[in-house]
Image: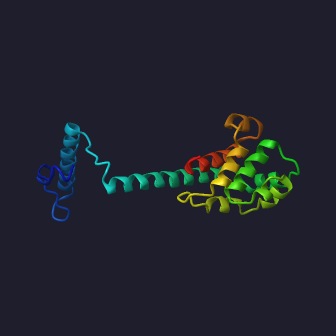
Amino acid sequence: VMGTHNDMVEGVAVGMYDDLPVETIRAVAATLGAVAKILAEEGPLLDHKAQAYSTSVERLETHFNACRFDKVMSEVIQTVDLRYIDGVKTTSSPLPMIMRIMQAIMYILGHQELDVTKWPKCRKLITHHIFKEMRMIDVRSQLKIHKLTLAKECIKDLNAGDIAMELGPKATMLWKWVIMMLAVQGL
């Protein structure tokens, strides 16, 4: 809008230093009104071929994934405590659902299939630093597709309702973290 209709938009004088605050607000509102009028008449004219457009779309997707990661990670930390993690770790034969969720988390964290497949080895990977490890993942970069595929396989037939009924909100939140990680990685 600014590039094609400079004459309409530049007609509004906006002074940032000499004008009273009320005058500055009126001038900004007038500028926004002019832009809104142009958009209402012509609609947004986006040049999808422009480099700036493709770069902004990439940034938006990256920013969305990072925000989604931060939101879900904060919910995990608020919902799941270390006592719960210790309880899962010390159980020699946990319920299959929580075992599969924890295995999926270990795959996403990058642990080897040999160490994750069998529960006695997998539970040794679960430490008090699990939240720190989970938070340190950079969702903007692509994780190993093999590990993500293994994680997806672990939880393929699990759903939030069954997990919530059988295991409660803490396990459900860990499952949601796995689902979010798979989604932001494109699986």
**Which residue appears at 24% of the width and 39% of the height?**
43
Q: Position of residue 118 (x, y in %)?
A: 83, 53
Seen as rendered, the residue at the extreme right is 92
Residue nearer the viewer, 178 or 88: 178
Q: Position of residue 178 (x, y in %)?
A: 65, 48
Q: Is residue 82 visible?
A: yes
Residue 59 in picture, x, y percent from top left: 42, 56
Q: Closer to the camera, 6 or 75? A: 6
Q: According to the image, what is the colour scheme of the structure?
A: rainbow
Q: Position of residue 109 (x, y in %)?
A: 68, 59
Judge from the rendering whether residue 63 lies leftward or rightward of residue 149; answer left or right: left
Query: Is 95 drawn above or below residue 7 in the view shown?
Result: above
Q: Quadrant of residue 120?
A: bottom right
Q: Nearer the viewer, residue 25 or 130?
A: 130
Residue at 73%, 47% (x, y): give it: 101
Dividing the picture into quadrants, the one containing residue 70 is bottom right
Question: Residue at position x 71%, y 63% from top?
Answer: 129
